Every structure is written in C-alpha cells, then in structure tokens.
Image (cartoon, helix red, strand yellow):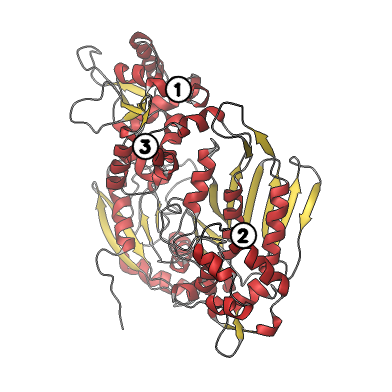
Amino acid sequence: MSFHFLGPEPVEAQLQRVLDGLAAGHSPRDIELLNVDVKEEPGRRDPTGAVLPGTAENEAAAKYLTGELACIANTPGAGAIILGVADDGQRIGTELSEEWLRHRIYQLSEQRLTVNVRAGDLGGTRVLVLQPPEAVEPIRWRGRIHWRVADNCVEVDAATWMAGRLHRSGFDWSAQPSGYRLDDVQASAMEIARRFLDQAGSDPAAADLAAATDNDLLRRLNVVDGDGRLTNAGALLFVTTRVPAIDYLRRDHPGGDSTIRVRREGPLLVQLAEVETAAAASNAIVQVAEGLVRGQMRKLPQSAVREAIVNGVVHRDWTADAPVVVEHVGDTLTVTSPGGFIAGITPENIITHPSAPRYQSLAEAAASLRLAEREGIGVDRMVASMLALGHERPEISELPGPYVRAVLLGGSPDEFWIEFLADISPKTLARDVDLLLMLDHLCRHGWIDSLRAAPVIQRGEAEARAALGRLSEAIFVDPLVTEVAGVPAGEPMAWRLSDVLLEWLEHRLGYRQGEARQRMILEWARARGRVSSTEVADLAGVAQNYAGKLLTELERQGRLEPGRPNRSGRGFFYRPVGG
C-alpha cells in the first residue's frame, strides 16, 4: 500500500528551494535546510585541493554517502542530498553512474537502504539528487544510529528513535494506563494542583475545577479510566516519577558553588512547585526609577521562567531517565531537557509552529491545571515577556543527545524601553510578539523589509508584510518607523526607526559604529543587491559625503565594487563582491 501527500511533498519543496538558491549563486552553508544537504563528491581532490576528473564509480564516495543517507532516512520526514557542489558554492559536479551508485549503497547498507538517484543540471553542471525513503526501523551504519539535528548528523539511541517513531504514528504513551490507582494519589500533589488553579485568578473554569472533589478533578483532567486506574500522565503528576525529573541548581555567579539545589522524587507537581519556588527566591527584584509606569520588577520575568521550566518538563522525552536540568546562574536561566524537537519543530519556527506535544494527554492535563497553554507551547508568550523588559529573546536550540536547551538572559530591565512600550499607540501593539521581534531586530540591525521580517517573526512573507503594516501605523510621538531614503523606485520598501526613536533608544543601537556599522552596510548590500551613499547616510545617521567614505573603505577592503566603471552619474551605487 502506498500513501501520497495532497499537494507538494515537503521534501520536494525544500529541495526546490535549495536548488533555486544554488542556481542563484548562494553557498550551501547559507541555504541548507534540515531535510536537504549539499555535498561535493568525496575523493575528487588531490593533496593540493585541486579537483580531479570524475569517474562513473567511486568507492570512497559510495561509502561516505551510505552513512549520510542512512542518517537522513532516520530523520523524521527523511530528506535528500544534492551531490556535486562544494561548501563554498563551487560547482564541481559528478560523473557517478546513477545505477551503480544506487546498487552500491544498497549493498553497503546490507540491503536496507534503497535510494532514488536522479541526475540534474545546475547551470551546465551535472549533479545528482539522492533521496532515501523515511526509515520504518532505525538504519544502522557501522553499528550506530544517526539522525539530523539542525544541519548535522548526530548519534541517537534506539529507544529515542523509536519514541519519535511512535509519536509520529499517533501513539501517546502518557494516555496509556499505569500500574497506579486513585488510592495511590498523594495529597500533597492534589493540594498543589489546586494552588496552581487558584493562581489563575478570575478564570471561572479554573475556579470550578479547583472546587471539584479529588476524584472528579482527576476525571476531568482525563488522567484516570473508568476502572480507577491512573494513566501514565496521572501517575507522573500525582504519584511519582521513576527518578527525579528535575535537577535545579542555583549559583550566584559562573563557576561558583551551588547555593540551592532541588532534586527529589515524588509527584511531578510537587517537584515543579519546589523548583518554581526556588527559582522565584533567586530571581532578584529591582526597583524601576520613579516616574516610569512600573514599580518593582524581577530581573527575569517570572512568567518566562515558569514557561521555560514547564515546557522542558511536559515536552521532554519520558523514556529517558535523565532529569531536566535547570541551571540558574546569576540572572541567566538555562533549561536543558532530554529529547529533541518533534513534529517538524525547529528553532526557526518554534514561535509560530502549531502545537505538537510529544505526549498529548500530559500536555492537556498541564494546560487544564494552568501550568501551560492549551492552544500552543507558550513560546510566543515567553519571547514577548522577555522582549517587553528589554532583554534578548530566548535562545532555544537542539543539542546532540538529543536535548532541547532554552536560555533566558535576564538582568536589570531597560527603563527607557519599558516607558517607550507603555506609550505606544495603539496599546495592544506593546504585547504583539511580532512587533516586539521586529523592533528588537531594528535596534540590532538598523533596517527591515518584508523578506527580512519573515524569518524574524517566523511567518510567511505575506504575513510579514501585514505585520510591517501594523508597525508602520504605530505611534510614539511620531510613527515608530520611517522608510529608508534612497531606495530606487520599484524596489521593495524598507524601514528604519524614526528619528524620535533613534534618539530615545540610542543606548540600544548596536549597529552605528565601527565594524558593526560596516556589517550593517554589507548586510544591506547583500540583501538588496546594491547600496548607495544616500541609503548609507540614512541608515547610519551620517552626512552623505561621509557615507561615501564608508563605501570607499569597503571597496578598498575588497567587499564592495562600483556599480559602473566611471564611478559617477546620478544614481551611482556599489555592489557586493561576489553578489
């Protein structure tokens, strides 16, 4: 039986994006995606690095590609390799026989890997596209299982691989019956469950649930069956975890001894409550200067702290015995949880990706207890609460193992930033995560357009244009943003901060001096394909003749070249070298 996607297959869509990028002259390192890799044919260079002529058969290439393709087949959704392009974008090509390579990979993989191999043309250079099917059981290469994390192949154990496979098939371990019954529920866990519900404030559904009897509360959480047996989710939350689920360590400064450590067994709710209490006690309170709109604030927003810890616990891999490690060092909180990203989630889409919990029943129970959001994984609110205080957005990444790591970098809130957000009109935009992300980007990079905004807010370009429209209509004395001067007619609009905001937020602008200013100019030139002294003067806040000197210096460094040989005339501009 075969199954087909309705519409374009995801891997084919990614493959086409990468091929289009290569055809446009981009280097592979800039355009590779999770499921699509670009490689040159191994064994095609002599000791000096010169490219050797290609042959129809290449044993070294077949062995190397077998390992890489096994890794891709083990990765959710599988993927493809484009063979024939070096890391720097040089089109080396390949003369490998399609039939020979397909059969040799089949032999080397012990008849477990059947790869679709097809030839393609990249501007006159022959390349091969190699595409394995997604593995239904782990494919080992030299005795080990690998899958892709970001753009690298990393080793993974069989249990973690199988847990991911079960999730993709719709199996929910947390909904399965456990060996515990209603009589095993611990009173301390029930007390804490009601405390979390009471903290929901004026939420009538939470108040109603908190007032229910113990047995009714558990049934309404859907963590007990008709025979009185707790599900695995119910057992975790209200009875015990197999080993300590969270290891919280507090250090006053990097390298210092731990001053608080929370690591215990028992119901997960009890563990969470103790860790949250310890984290709150270590989260310093600062006084915001009188005259601004807030009084006391913590150096890390407590809502972001809870979201990071709860996400790390609820969405972790519960087949692993390792605890979620919460390191609270100074004003930085790092949460590292076992299990990688699932269901297509990546750092590049985690803010806007639809909810895809590893354990649906556990996630729903946590949402009902008001520990986490029902409609998503809450990352958007975590990002918004950090940015609203002037902090950096959370760093969320996947590590070999695999693990997911979330880092919150706190400190004293930025009072000018807070006052600015409080005075924005309309008021709702101060809580708009898209607006906060774009404003943060403008402070760091100086400009934004719809193409650049799309990955910043993790949305499509049409949604990015709409978000930029909302940004352009917002007011702080004057409009928040203004169009960049000097953009040629017919080119996409670009925006920078208004002059009022440039003055108000001067302390946050990291792109207007020295090397940072040069990077900003080159970013503009590479993204837009050209740069003029008018554009540089407007972006860098300098006189036009000085902007010309900045461009001349970048030309001297070999990073820009004149747009026309005579270097004169109306509309003269520079181009990025190699662009």
Dividing the picture into quarters, in which one does residue 293 lie? top right
What residue is drawn where x is 74% and y is 52%? 249
Which residue is denoted by mark 3 in the rendering? Answer: 426
Q: Is residue 441 left or right of residue 566?
A: right
- Image quadrant where one finds the C terminus: top left
- Judge whether 579 appears above or below 220 on screen: above
Compare marks 2 and 3 and give the one earlier in the sequence: 2
Q: Which numbered circle lies on residue 505?
A: none
Secondary structure under badge 3? loop
Compare marks 3 and 1 and give the one earlier in the sequence: 3
As shown in the figure, which amino acid type bears the numbered disc 2?
Answer: Ser
As shown in the figure, which amino acid type bears the numbered disc 1?
Answer: Arg
Q: Is residue 204 left or right of residue 520?
A: right
- Image quadrant where one finds the N terminus: bottom left
Residue 260 shows up from this direction: yes
Which residue is denoted by mark 2 in the rendering? Answer: 337
Dividing the picture into quarters, in which one does residue 316 lie? bottom right
Q: Residue furthest top?
A: 545
